[in-house]
Amino acid sequence: MPLSMVKEGEASIIKKVSGKEETRRFLETLGFVIGSTVTVVAAMAGNIIVTIKDVRIAIGKDMANKIMV
């Protein structure tokens, strides 16, 4: 399921990152790599705040739809 559908406070493991090559590379530089654990902190106004590798990152819902957990 896409990261955008994960409930707040729930931890998930990244299974796949889709999208164009440049989009995948950008997400990888932020820490969204296969096998990493990501926790949704909050979801509001089309943005999702997640914790990955002890860092909080805000991404848009369209980006979150490209990350499968």
Image: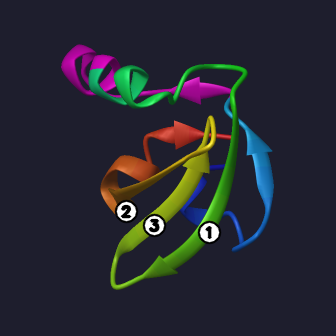
Marks 1 and 2, how far apart at CA:
14 Å
Q: Position of residue 25 (x, y in %)?
A: 31, 17
Left or right of residue 57: residue 46: left
Instruction: Give the residue pinned by disc 2.
Output: 61
N-terminal label among 1 and 3: 1
Residue 53: mark in rendering = none
Q: Tell me the mark number nearer the camera, choosing from 3 and 2.
A: 3
Q: Position of residue 63 (x, y in %)?
A: 35, 48
Let me know if residue 19 is in the magenta part. Answer: yes
Residue type at tag 2: Lys
Which residue position is annotated with label 1?
A: 41
Answer left or right for 21 relative to 63. left
Observer-side mark, 1 or 2, equals: 1
Mark 1 residue type: Val
Residue 34, position as x, y percentages in the image? 63, 19
Q: CA gap, disc 1 to disc 3?
A: 8 Å
Q: How many marks?
A: 3
Q: Residues within 10 Å of mark 1 (few under 14, many from 20)?
A: some
> If you read the primary sequence from the N terminus, does the residue marked by circle 3 or circle 2 appear first?
3
Q: Secondary structure at mark 2?
A: helix
Residue name at image x 44 percent, y 51 percent? 64
* Residue behind mark 3: 48
Nearest the eye: 48 or 5: 48
Packing grade of label 2 (10 A; few <14, some 14-19, many >=20) is some
Q: Residue furthest front?
A: 54
Q: Secondary structure at mark 1?
A: strand
Q: Residue 9 colored magenta?
A: no
